Amino acid sequence: NTMNVKLCANCNVLVRRSSSSLKNLLIKSSIHVKQLHITSHRMCESQVKVAEDPIPNTSKRERSLVSKSMKQLRILGSLSKFRLSSLVVLTSGAGYVAALPLLAVVDYSGMLAACIGTGLCAASASTFNQVIEVDRDRVMRRTQARPLPAKQISPEMASLWGAGTGVAGLGLLLAGTNPTTAALGLLNIGLYAGAYTYSKPHTELNTWIGSLVGAVPPVMGWAAATGGSMSELLSPTCVSLSLLLYLWQF
């Protein structure tokens, strides 16, 4: 009996100790789970903050400056009619590529100068077109959101941008290609910003002038590749390219 009592007492002690150990283990586990939950919650909050702030290491002033710069780029891109100018660059490049079989050596720097210079000339012409047409754009629903009617940029700044892109484009064409290509670029700026723009309110023939503007860039690419001689400009391939672009616009 005495041994049974001692054995029961030892069992009770062992059970109490085991129960106490299990209780402590559960408490520690609960604390650990809570810590993990808090840590994961903080990580989620930090990820949300990073997502909301794409430039987390910059100050508010720097973020504001980046935002304003992006806005200005969008305005200048709209003034330049970026998509239309990109198409002009492609057609100029197509004219250059069409002349490659005639070349003994391909001048890639000349090709790049022709494409970029033509694009800058197109940006200049588009900008001056909008400067001239600002009053008409202001009363047309389709064009009211353009930068000048919406007063996102002043006419003076827009004119400065048009002059800058024009000078840069013509200078690049003159330095990187030949005088004939640069002259064609100047001609296209005058046709679009001058003859086409001013004839719009007066005659439907302005569409013919506008189509002529679209037919010149492939000739510029061809002239940049071949040297720009009159015989090359009147070659069947060059004339066909220009005529194809001209008719495609109707």
Image: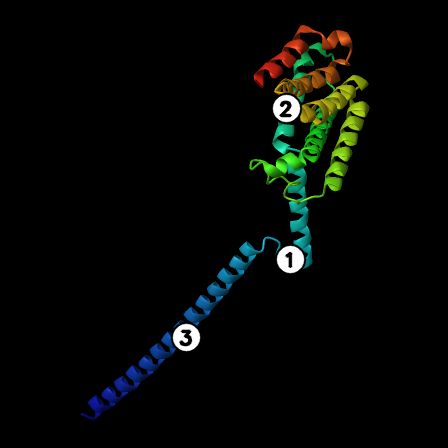
> Where is mark 1, residue-wise?
57
Q: Which of 208 and 58 is in front in this view?
A: 208
Q: Mark 2 points at which residue?
A: 90
Between disc 2 and disc 1, the foreground one is 2
Q: Residue at x 62, y 39 (%)?
A: 138
Quadrant of residue 80 within the rendered picture: top right
Q: Which of 226 and 135 is in front in this view?
A: 135
Give the mark nearer the N terminus: 3 vs 1: 3
What label does residue 244 carry, if any?
none
Q: Residue at x 64, y 57 (%)?
A: 57
Residue lying furthest front in this view? 202
The local secondary structure at tag 3 comes to: helix
Neighbour tally class for label 2: few under 14, some 14-19, many 20 plus, Cα within 10 Å: some
Q: In which quarter of the image is the C terminus?
A: top right
Q: Which of marks 3 and 2 is in front?
A: 2
Query: Which x, y percent locates residue 188?
Result: 72, 22
The vertical placement of 37 against 98, above or below, is: below
Residue nearest the observer in this picture, 107 or 241: 241
Under mark 3, the amino acid is Lys
Above/below status of 26 relative to 49: below
